[in-house]
Image (spheres, rainbow, N blue to C red):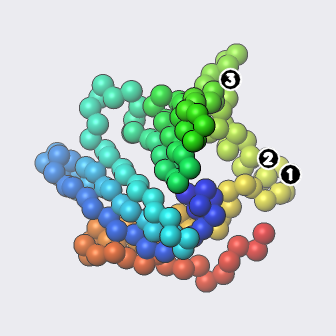
Amino acid sequence: MRWFFGSEAVEARAYGVKEVLVQKGIDTYDLIQAQIRFESGAIATIESGWIYPNTFPTIVDSFVEVVGSQGHLHFDRKRESIEMSTPEKFSYPKTFLTHEIFGKLRGAFVECLSDFLDSIINKTVPKVTAFDGRQVTAVLDAVSRSLESGNTEKVAAAIMKQKY
């Protein structure tokens, strides 16, 4: 979402439920829902659920939906699809996150891994950097603190901005 919004997260407010997994002796949340506010004013809602039935088609429900003033995007992991609407039309651009073609995996996940490996081999900066990882970790920390405190928590600002 940082990349999409072109903005850093500044605060998080999270809610969680501990019931089913705790009853099974696993001290973790069944579901967490968090709202993240960005410097730009954009808001993202992030959800993580761990109690889907075994019949669910993927390990977790994974999608991203962006609603803006002129349209929306919906990336759905379990259907391996994208929906897009604009004032002019609604469409399903053809793309896959992962898909086997001629016995090899293809798609966005594979390309992200390939970029990382290429950056090691070619000694170049990967598209997703350690700074990106730090920023995501700071958001997750704020979400965890919000779950404990019941309050909106600030996302820890980076001491240094990314150099490249």
Residue pointed to by mark 2: 118
The residue tagged 3 is: 104
- Say left or right for 150 vs 118: left
Q: Along the polypeptide, which appears first: circle 1 or circle 3?
A: 3
Tell me if label 1 and label 2 are in contact, CB under 8 Å: yes
Comes first in the chain, label 3 or label 2: 3
Q: Which residue is mark 1?
A: 122
Does residue 19 appear anywhere in the picture? yes
* Mark 1 residue crowding within 10 angstroms, few (<14) / some (14–19) / many (20+): few
CA gap, disc 1 and disc 3: 23 Å
Which percent across, then down, holds residue 115? 74, 46
Q: Nearer the viewer, residue 60 or 103?
A: 60
Would you say 117 lies left or right of 123 here? left
Q: Is 124 drawn above or below residue 56 in the view shown?
A: below
User: The C terminus appears in which quarter of the rendering?
Assistant: bottom right
Judged from the image, the secondary structure of the residue bearing numbered disc 1 is helix
